[in-house]
Image: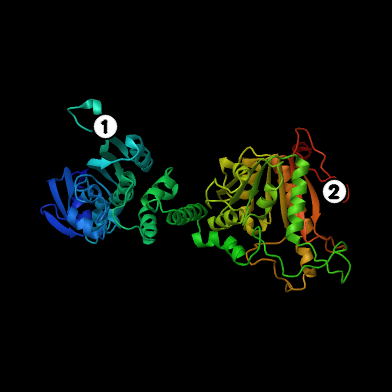
Amino acid sequence: MFLTITTTGTAERPATDLGFLLHKHPDKAQRFSTSYGTAHVLYPEATAERCTAALLLEVDPVALVRRGRGKGRGGAPDSALAQYVNDRPYAASSLLAVALSAVFSSALRGQCKARPELPERALPLRIEVPALPARGGAALVERLFAPLGWAVTAEPVALDEEFPRWGDSRYVRLVLEGELRLADALRHLYVLLPVLDDAKHYWVAPDEVDKLLRSGEGWLERHPEQRLITNRYLARRWSLTRSALERLELARLAEADDTEAEEIDNAVDNAIDNGVGNAIGEPAAEPLGEDDGEEGSGQRPVPLAARRREAILDALRGTGAARVLDLGCGQGQLLGALLKETRFTEIVGVDVSMRALNEAARRLRLDRPGLDTGSVDRQSSARLKLTQGALTYTDSRLAGYDAAVLSEVIEHVDPPRLPALEHAVFGAARPEAVVVTTPNVEYNVRWETLPAGRMRHGDHRFEWTREEFRAWAEQVAQRYGYAVEFRPVGPEDPEVGPPTQLALFRMAAEGGGDGTDSRSGDSTAITTKEAAA
């Protein structure tokens, strides 16, 4: 296996600085023992104008078989022979990636004690790999490296130059050119060489997830081929792939939100641990309403969560919606209720927490949690999709739906972030109707188990009175051209109102709307035309 790294320079910034970065002196040829053979580092050229470092890995097939703990022994003769006669000594693979990590470990970490300013400097780099297995062909090589800032040349290698009609082999000659930090270039190679070979020549343990995320930090979370890279790098072990994808998405969202990944996942995780639905924890005991049955009748009161779901379904039925978004779907209780009604032909559950989505998938008996497909019920499979996303950022995938639901979600958002959520939902996604539910803080005094002044869930950033919720909803409706009406959810107390309050937004026709409060008949519709007046 052979790989070269070339850079150019000037008298002020000599190309031989590459030797400082790699921690290998250009005037020396060095050799290093590895578990699979011997690695050599040498410099075919080293001048101020141009410097090339070469890594040559001599693989010992016998050592490779021994490291495999006898794989192939005792089986078919051809299988045993293939352990010794193969392309491993000649084609770049995960073994070369391991050698890169072992020989250039400091360079991979971006460390240079002698010249600490060098690792942060972008260099004009040219990397050549004469023989690279590429399962997916030259097109896949381009898709993997081009988004990282490389100019890619991937020339297919013919099976036999004397017999062109035989076609091309699965190998390519790879040339990468670009201006990048050396550490970034080495990390790209460390991850993508085994991905293109689509084979790992050693046992893939759970710590491989940490290696992938460490080397992919800063680029893998935004790579368009993230799922393919992760799946192949982890040898298609689904449990490891799912774990890596969850952590990558949290890292991306944390970077966008300028916070820690643990903080993003904390709110819904707490809800799951507490056994509550839709990211909301209600106090353990619920006061009885007038319709909850006579005292001593033995009838159990209807849980508020069930009342809330029915109120949402009733609002959606009234809109005639068929394609519905459940934004902040949590563990999927509402998704399950939506699936029971065939009128809802397309249902999308969105949540920032992959843990919550996986729990929803388990509850709904999806075959492969965290993905957008799979269900025991084929009809449900065609109607339901789970997607990870942050509701404070616009997402083109959410545009064009008939209705969206924000059930017990807004109170988990920091008030300064609410305008971002409003724009993402009402301005960018812009469904025909939006259903929003949130706790009525005035009703908290009726919860015997809730201490005075305490909110219903530890992650709530606020809880609004009826007047505060109405003011917020009317402002949103006015700003984005919706009409809004308000409905109570749960037993309505004559003094403090219902435990949950619901707002139903409908996109207002140009020129005005006529939404009314379902309780009193008061006009509550806010339209663009009325706002202008």
**What residue does disc 2 label?**
518
How far apart marks 1 and 2 lie (CA) works out to: 71 Å
Residue 344 visible to the viewer: yes
Image position of 335 with respect to 528: above or below: below
Looking at the rendering, which quadrant does residue 341 occupy?
A: top right
Whole-percent x, y for residue 265 in the image: 54, 60
Where is 160 relative to 150, above or below? above
Q: State which tag comes first along the sequence, 1 or 2.
A: 1
**In this image, 3 relative to 138: left or right?**
left
| Tag 1: amino acid | Asp
Residue at screen point 89% across, 67% down = 294
Q: Which residue is mark 1?
A: 168
User: At which x and y percent is residue 369?
Assistant: 53, 53
Q: Check the image and name the residue furthest to the top.
A: 165
Q: Residues within 10 Å of mark 1 (few under 14, many from 20)?
A: some
Q: Amino acid at mark 2?
A: Ser
Quadrant where the C terminus lies? top right
